[in-house]
Amino acid sequence: MSLNNTKHISIITFAAIFLISCNLDNSAKTDSNKYRGWSSYLGGPDRNHYSTLSQITLENVTQLKMAWSYSAPDSGQMQMNPIVVDTILYGVTAALRAVALDAGTGKEIWRFGDTLNLERATSRGMAYWEKNDDKRILFTQGTHLFALNALTGTPISSFGENGKVDLHSGLPSSAKDKFVSSNTPGTVYKDLIVMPIRLSEGRGAAPGDIMAFNVITGQLEWVFHTIPYPGESGNETWEDPESYKSDIVGAANNWAGMALDEETGILYVPTGSAAPDFFGGDRKGSNLYANTLLALNAQTGKLLWHYQFTHHDLWDRDPPAPPNLLTINREGQKIAAVAQVTKQGFVFLFNRATGEPLFDIEEIPVPPSTLEGEKTWATQPFPTKPKPFARQSNLLTDKDLSPYAENKEELLALFNNADKRIYAPPSLDPVLLLPGYDGAAEWGGAAADPEEGILYVNSNEMAWFLQMKKDTLDTNMALGKYTYNKYCIVCHQKDMKGDVASGYPSLIDLKRTHGKEAVALTIKKGKGMMTGFPQIKKAEMNALLQFLYGEEMLKDEINNVVKPIETTYKHTGYKKFLDSNGLPAISPPWGTLHAIDLNSGDYIWSIPFGETMSLKEKGFPQTGSENYGGAIVTENGLLFIGATKDGYFRAFNKKNGKLLWEYKLPAPAFATPAMYEVNGKQFIAIACGGEKLGTEKGNMIIAFSLE
């Protein structure tokens, strides 16, 4: 371990950790009864995507039929993992409307959401809490955490302000006008809910404090500062000890969700990158507690131990999903472990109580930066086992270019011109990232058999380019163009054409396709993967709209010329490495699925995952495809997963990866399914919203059963 990864276990907490360790050892045996339901995000607080229901088997899975479907009143990305309590299935639509359905028939029971003021973000689900007859659904819509009566869908008026709490309320007052939302369910522990938050990733982002609210009242109960204050452990890892209140630095937030050991009361929280992304000249140091797995006392927020996965992150290499809590076997001894998959394609495995790595981790030197003012960290951690579950850029050769590409000479020139070293720092020249920005693992996370110690993870193999430019401003730049350059240019490019193939739309024809009011709302609140910019002042917004609609002139009073700012560096945009047909420029597989034995660190099987239909129709072998969403795994041998761009829902034999069943959905399911039973019948339900990766939109939740 490096200095930055030493465990944070004080003498005061050592005795408590010892007792927790004993409890962990005693509770290593899986309680199969707790895996028969799906009342929590990803199946349970351990986030293992695991079920012991056994009516659907290896022998009869081919007999699965659609049991029911529900059509939401809106369409688009539905990333949510439903939860099921008693006989009610709860979910969130593409426009962030909460719905309650009869889990056996799909009939709508209630719906919550203002039809005249629909949000256009994404949601991965909701949380449930109950005490006696008080049953609550907790979910977020924009900046607000709502508490709803689980049976009626009406807000609980005694919670916060008329049923909702502003997520800004736990942050410093300096963040009150900054973008804050949440699209991942909070984690409930006793009468607390600990909230993930989504923030801007650019200059001036809000701080990513971990916040726990009282489920009954909405009152803030505790806060953990991920950018430590002076006197707090970790503050010394920032060269500027006042980074916590910087106008430039922020984030280090938990956006991906967290896992909870209910028996020990330990919360495992992976944190995101510090902002701004890609250039860290204003945040020198290793930057604890960004890119870190935190083990916190769930009741108090006290830090027990930590491990940092990426020091001084310049690549947006934050953990993309909650960790998995499972048991492994070492020399006949059961060890309660926590496993974290990463965008880099690594699996880090720790003793759940102490934070000790269960496979050695090496700190390996990485290249220094050539950008003025940047100070890269000298080493990065690499686990010795398991091996990465995705290809690494430094191992690519020109033989790894796609055999299907028609513009190979052009691709070869781009390939040869790019820096392919692992952790090659951002520079004025292109860096090839593989795995790409979204990662090998992504927000769907891994499934796990908690007793056998087997991890199942789907992975993307999409290369992207990373490049920087000097951020200099014309002294005669109007306010609208300045605002565009400040907030929009990274994704939508200087010419406003975006990069449609990489998921960033053109704004050229905005005047014809969208009204100003709708565009202003999207800018303020965000949409899909776009964060909002609520801090934009009225004059800036009006000027930006004039610029976007081709109406801006320097003589306009609204467009006062802005002064130049100090030169820094800016990301040139998110660009996939694609061929002339829009397919990945590297060779297949472009999506993979793996089973990893965490007892030994060895792979059980790895297969291509998904199809590229245009190539399949020509008779080419399976290529795999981009995939977003997770799997679920059953005790009796099955693995179910949607996630792929091709729009299929599939079942595999978890022992060998053999495909057993597939079903063509009405739209791709970029989501994780849920497994449950009603009146003795086993169901598996999944949201099919499509839209991502340029696919068709959908609006359905579909449940399957044997009859």
Image (cartoon, rainbow, N blue to C red):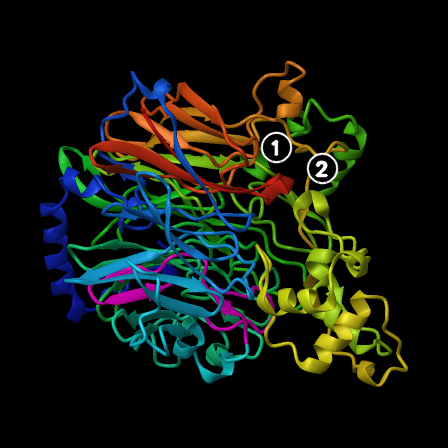
Task: Please identify the dominant SS of the magenta region.
Answer: loop
Residue at 64 percent of width and 27 percent of height: 400
Horizontal side of residue 605 vs 503, given as left or right: left
* Residue type for callout 1: Leu
What span is colored magenta in the figure?
A: 178-207
Q: Residue 581's x, y, as percent?
A: 74, 31
361 w.r.t. 606: above or below? below
Q: Residue 431's x, y, as percent?
A: 66, 47
Name the foreground residue: 601 vs 256: 256
Q: Residue 580's x, y, as percent?
A: 77, 33
State the residue position of label 2. 415
User: From where the camera sits, is residue 126 visible?
Assistant: yes
User: From where the camera sits, is residue 472 visible?
Assistant: no
Residue at 46 percent of width and 41 percent of height: 629
Distance in Å between CA atoms under marks 2 and 1:
10 Å
Marked residue nearer the N-terminal end (2 or 1): 1
601 w.r.t. 163: above or below? above
Name the foreground residue: 150 vs 265: 150
Horizontal side of residue 578 vs 199, given as left or right: right
